Amino acid sequence: MRTLVLGGIRSGKSQWAESAIASAAGDGAPVCYLATGPAADTDPAWAHRVGAHRARRPAHWHTVETADLVAALAAGPHEPGTATLVDDIGGWLTATMDRLGAWTGASVTGEVDALVRAVDAFTAPLALVSPEVGLTVVPATEAGRRFADELGTVNQRLAAVCDRVVLVVAGQPLTVKEPT
């Protein structure tokens, strides 16, 4: 089962996804946690957020901090069938846009295509956490609008290949798509 978990900032989407993937894996089973955000070297507020995420993870979960999400998914979990959590797609997209110079017009389509293929081919339980866009004002800058547009496209494409889509609002899950 592939699940896309959407929500706004501080909506509780990561905590919900952590609980859901732990349930999918089974009690005490290993989980691979793919963290896409940058290291918290210079920003104390970001370091606090990263620390809170790390502190919530059970000790038996294996964490991989990577911006190369496609390679990590394609390689699969260390043990076949290991449930995997990706947190989050927005961090991956930011790193991808940085690497490709997409803030000023370069395309990320090839990278998005590769990510969608990797998610579609993934056979173990998978939860993808991503910020939902379009629930607030249109960004005032070109780069902000480009990010929102690209993230909206990524979310739509991932939702199409995921079995389940859940929107988390104020910590409460709302099912958008169920397995067919």
Image (tube, rainbow, N blue to C red):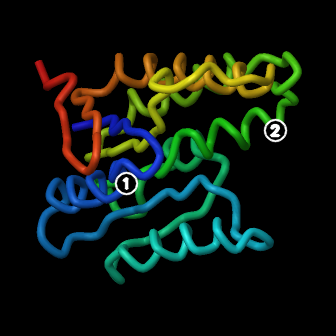
Which of the pair 104/76 is nearer the observer? 104
Which quadrant of the rendered structure holds the C terminus?
top left
**Residue 45's quadrant in the figure?**
bottom right
Residue density around tag 1, few if under 14, some if 14–19, many if 20 or more, within 10 Å: many
> Is 166 left or right of 89, judged from the image as shown?
left
Residue shown at 84% from the left, 18% from the top: 106
Task: Give, as a three-letter code, the residue at label 2.
Answer: Asp
Up-down relation of residue 82 to residue 124 (above or below): below
Q: What residue is disc 2 on?
A: 98
Which mark is first along the chain, 1 or 2?
1
> Is 150 left or right of 162, judged from the image as shown?
right
Which of the pair 74/39 is nearer the observer? 39
Counting from the top left corner in percent of width and height, residue 47 is at 64, 72
**Residue 64's quadrant in the figure?**
bottom right
Residue 113's label in the rendered image is none
Counting from the top left corner in percent of width and height, residue 68 is at 65, 47
Q: What residue is disc 1 on?
A: 14
Counting from the top left corner in percent of width and height, residue 84 is at 36, 54
**Residue 135's quadrant in the figure?**
top left
**Which mark is in front, 2 or 1?**
1
Residue shown at 81% from the left, 38% from the top: 98
- Asked whether the viewer can see residue 82, the reply is no
- Asked whether the viewer can see residue 9, the reply is yes
Task: Give, as a three-letter code, the residue at label 1.
Answer: Ser
Which quadrant of the rendered structure holds the N terminus?
top left
Counting from the top left corner in percent of width and height, residue 78 is at 42, 63
**Label 1: element kind:** helix
